[in-house]
Image (spheres, rainbow, N blue to C red):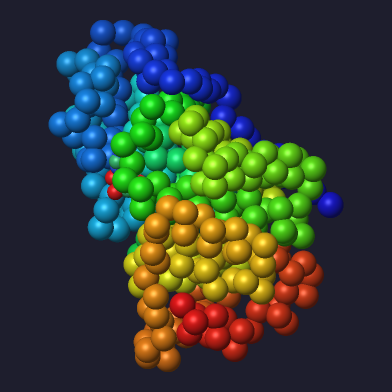
């Protein structure tokens, strides 16, 4: 048996207002006058207060990224990387991702592609990255995905949606400032927050569970309950910690049925990760009875309504495509059922699930 040798984020700052420390953190990387930093920032912050707080020097480059239409693509990563190369013949001393899972994953991917030749699609998979990335920093402004803690940057490529999974993908530094998530609209706050809740349920209910994942998963779940059921006054601080700990939990276990089904919805119908998970989770009573029940309480409490009957009338071939994607998520199903999962994850079972969505 071989145990996972998990690379964790080596440096992190947590606290309200800690974004202001970014300048100081970057000063350690800037060694000469010409050293520059690249900021990969969610466009939602353009023209807002946060833009003025970015410690941008004259030689630095800001890349605004629009993440609403589609989730990050290999094409987008390659274009952003080319923009950095056009800016200077040298590499930046740091790439800073500011935003949700999308902007953070784009920053991770750009930092990798600056030191690894060829397009990013070439590296979709596990441990294909050859060279260490440029120093990179993650600063979440919406919480739940755990992307700040993970060793992947999820990208939609020409053939599939698959991450750049490697030890080099992990951020060198993260800054968790709960003030930054206060402006997230309720629906988005809920969808991304539920990604975290679902990470906990899938990790804690899975066959891969171990004391490491359990410790993080249980604490994260407790924080999610305080955020989504109790409206705790410090809910932003709590959700930010829940996201990180949920990420730590799945990193040493695995996600499960909801993510498998959600990947099908995302790949074929374009639903983004958070909302796709919510839609999928709502039909998974048989897999996670307690979790789904509590999730519905949370939905109700925050007046969030999910799209219904999305797949009911879709052509069979569209459903089959989603079934194929969901079925290809071997490790996720292995986590759900343990050995022998192949016999349980049938086309019939998955088709029936999708038809109920
Ligand atoms: P996101 O980054 O796609 O952002 C969702 C929306 O929130 C966008 O409209 C964005 O502009 C907006 N937003 C962000 N910060 C805001 C703020 N402070 N105020 C107002 N609006 C704000 O959402 P997400 O759910 O965090 O990330 C989803 C992406 O993360 C997907 O592409 C998914 O594949 C990826 N993901 C990655 C990992 C990983 O480990 N790398 C894990 C899970 C998901
Ligand atoms: Zn997720």
Q: Is residue 134 in sight in this rendering?
A: no
Measured from the top left, where is residue 245 in percent x and y?
61, 38
Among all residues in the image, which is located at the extreme bottom? 316
Task: Name the quadrant containing residue 137.
Answer: top left
Give the residue drawn at x 42%, y 91%. 316
Q: Is residue 212 in sight in this rendering?
A: yes
Above or below — where is 324 with respect to 5? Answer: below
Task: Name the quadrant containing residue 143.
Answer: top left
Measured from the top left, where is residue 105 in percent x and y?
41, 43
Give the residue drawn at x 72%, y 58%. 205
- Of residues 277 and 60, the one drawn nearer to the viewer in this rendering: 277
Q: Is residue 340 left or right of residue 129?
A: right
Among all residues in the image, which is located at the extreme right? 1
Task: Name the quadrant containing residue 212.
Answer: top right
Measured from the top left, where is residue 140 in percent x and y?
41, 35
Total numbered circles: 0
Above or below — where is 228 with respect to 208? Answer: above
Give the residue drawn at x 65%, y 79%. 345
Q: Is residue 48 left or right of residue 304?
A: left
Q: Is residue 8 left or right of residue 17?
A: right
Measured from the top left, where is residue 226 in percent x and y?
57, 40
């Amino acid at each position: 048996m071989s145990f996972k040798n998990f690379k964790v984020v080596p440096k992190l700052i947590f606290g309200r207002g800690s974004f202001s420390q970014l300048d100081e953190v970057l000063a350690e990387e800037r060694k000469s006058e010409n050293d520059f930093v690249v900021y990969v920032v969610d466009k939602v912050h353009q023209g807002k207060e946060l833009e003025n707080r970015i410690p941008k020097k004259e030689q630095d480059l800001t890349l605004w990224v629009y993440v609403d239409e589609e989730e990050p693509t290999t094409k987008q990563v390659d274009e952003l990387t080319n923009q950095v190369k056009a800016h200077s013949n040298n590499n930046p001393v740091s790439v800073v991702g500011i935003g949700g899972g999308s902007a953070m994953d784009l920053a991770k991917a750009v930092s990798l592609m600056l030191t690894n030749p060829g397009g990013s699609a070439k590296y979709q998979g596990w441990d294909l990255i050859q060279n260490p990335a440029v120093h990179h920093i993650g600063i979440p402004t919406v919480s739940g995905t755990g992307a700040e803690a993970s060793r992947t940057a999820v990208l939609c490529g020409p053939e599939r949606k698959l991450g750049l999974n490697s030890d080099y993908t992990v951020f060198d530094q993260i800054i968790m400032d709960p003030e930054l998530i206060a402006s997230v609209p309720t629906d988005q706050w809920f969808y991304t927050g539920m990604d975290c809740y679902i990470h906990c349920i899938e990790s804690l209910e899975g066959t891969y569970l171990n004391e490491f994942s359990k410790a993080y998963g249980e604490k994260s779940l407790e924080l999610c309950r305080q955020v989504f059921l109790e409206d705790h006054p410090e809910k932003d601080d709590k959700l930010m910690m829940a996201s990180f700990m949920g990420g730590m939990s799945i990193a040493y276990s695995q996600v499960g049925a909801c993510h498998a089904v959600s990947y099908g919805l995302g790949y074929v119908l374009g639903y983004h990760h958070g909302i796709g998970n919510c839609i999928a989770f709502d039909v998974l009573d048989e897999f996670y009875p307690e979790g789904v029940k509590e999730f519905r309480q949370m939905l109700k409490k925050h007046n969030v309504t999910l799209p219904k009957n999305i797949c009911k009338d879709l052509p069979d071939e569209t459903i089959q495509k989603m079934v194929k994607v969901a079925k290809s998520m071997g490790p996720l199903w292995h986590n759900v059922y343990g050995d022998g999962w192949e016999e349980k994850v049938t086309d019939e079972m998955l088709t029936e699930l999708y038809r109920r969505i």
